[in-house]
Image: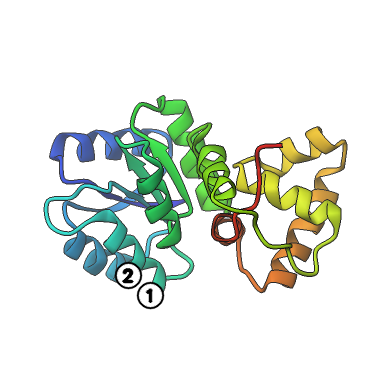
Amino acid sequence: MTRVMIVDDHPMWREGVARDLTTRGYDVCATAADAPSAVKIALATQPDVIIMDLQLGTGSGVEATREITAALPDTRVLVLSASAEQEDVLAAVKNGASGYLVKSASLDEFDDAVRRTAEGDAVFTPGLAGLLLGEYHRLGPGPEVPHLTTRETEILRLVARGLTAKQIATRLVLSHRTVENHVQNTLRKLQLHNRAELVRYAIENGLDTTN
């Protein structure tokens, strides 16, 4: 059972999310209302996934995400925010978030995002990753990706857009195993650990994911 922690400064929202996740079979092991408490409680409980709001009463979700992911590399943070601004998405991802979902998402979309985050996928509300990465590409040409084959680079771009291995396999007419092998080879070559770090790599290097 996936252990989940919820960080949000609105008690009714926090309780509602906890109730929905419990109904869907998750173990909600902790909640917090502000950044300092979130860091302290996360270090004590070490959840698998943290649902993190950005605007908190004390401190910010970005600050809490940075501290938590630095101390707990196996804990993944999924931002759940009312904001869809590129600057907020960028700040969250660059500080360790594995994904970013807006609060207008449906319960099924939320459930899917939590599950995929726990499995190691980088999850974004549709359109956010492409818009953000496209903006970085617009600011200037990105560098060549070192040591990657054409196929590995192609798959890296699709991972950065938030596609699952199954979706990539369907799009490129490859087997699921072949896609996973390419992802693992790319992680090894770039000395990264998971799909969330691949997304950060793509953002920071301005890879074009609009094609």
Type of amino acid under label 2: Glu
Residue 75, quarter of the rendered image? bottom left
Crowd tier of the residue under label 2, counting other residues whose Cα lies within 10 Å: few below 14, some 14–19, many 20 or above: many
Determine contact: label 1, label 2, CB under 8 Å.
yes
- Measure the C-alpha gap from mark 1 to mark 2: 6 Å
Q: Which of marks 1 and 2 is in front?
A: 2
Residue 140, x across and y down, in percent: 59, 53
Residue 195 lies, in percent from the top left, at: 61, 56
The residue lying furthest to the front in this view is 140
Which residue occupies 28% across, 40% down? 18
Query: 91 or 102, which is in the foreground?
Result: 91
**Position of 161 compared to 65: left or right?**
right
**Mark 1: secondary structure:** helix
Quadrant location of residue 92? bottom left
Q: Which mark is residue 67?
A: 2
Q: Which residue is drawn at 52% across and 38% down?
A: 131
* Disc 1: which residue: 71
Q: Is residue 169 above or below residue 34?
A: above
Amino acid type at circle 1 is Ala
